[in-house]
Amino acid sequence: MKNYDKLKKITLSLLEEIGEDPAREGLIKTPTRVAKAWEFFSKGYDESLDEVINEAVFHEDAKDMVIVRDIEFFSLCEHHLLPFFGKAHVGYIPNGKVIGLSKIPRIIDMFARRLQVQERLTHQIADAIQNVLNPIGVAVVMEGVHMCMQMRGVEKQNSFASTSSMLGQFRKSAETRTEFLSIISK
């Protein structure tokens, strides 16, 4: 963690600034809990793609689309430090290499555990898989609910955002893109 004690001190100041009594029974341990939470929320800054993948790339003759769908993700909006969360769907067409399936959610988590916007997060995931596997194509679709839209501002509780990144064959071929979108919508 960058500076655990400093996060506790900042949280204590925040509580005082909004008019709370940090010595109140329910708030005494809040600065420590918040510091621990921020350690978890921001752990993606301390992770690297190589560490996350941990050599789980394998030579394989597979040629058909590989899809992992409905992967839950949680992140924090960099504009308001409020959560956004939802589901990610990732597909790729191998080009002589595959990745351990559990590594795809780990890649998502690595990037999601940083201050984000959903658009960037979507592209970071696609680019990471492209760089690691050099597949024929990569597709990432993310559907997110944003607390900054639901709790404040426009206060639209039933809204969600969809973003996509299509690389290689998924960008070039409407047929490939349609197959992917059809599979993830089931």
Image (cartoon, rainbow, N blue to C red):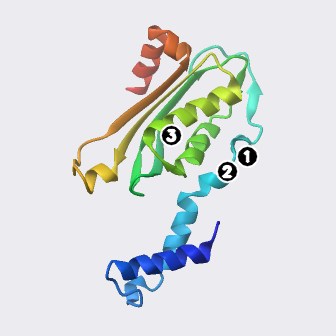
State the image quarter where residue 151 is shown.
Answer: bottom left
Q: Which residue is mark 2?
A: 47
Q: Position of residue 13 (x, y in %)?
A: 44, 80
* Sequence-first tag of 3 and 1: 1
Q: Which mark is residue 121?
A: 3
Question: In this view of the protein, which residue sits in the foreground, 3 or 39?
Answer: 3
Q: Position of residue 123 (x, y in %)?
A: 52, 33
Question: In this view of the protein, which residue sits in the foreground, 42 or 88?
Answer: 42
The Cα atoms of the two marked residues, 3 and 2, are separated by: 15 Å
| CB contact under 8 Å: marks 2 and 1 | yes
Q: Position of residue 105 (x, y in %)?
A: 57, 41
Q: Which mark is residue 51?
A: 1
What is the number of callouts on the image? 3
The Cα atoms of the two marked residues, 3 and 1, are separated by: 19 Å
Q: Amino acid at mark 1?
A: Glu
Q: Position of residue 148 (x, y in %)?
A: 32, 52
* Sequence-first tag of 3 and 2: 2
Element assignment for label 3? helix
Q: Amino acid at mark 3?
A: Leu
Which-is-in-front pick, marks 3 and 1? Answer: 3
In the image: residue 65, left or right of residue 29: right
Element assignment for label 2? loop
- Which residue is painted at 69% across and 46% down in the image? 48
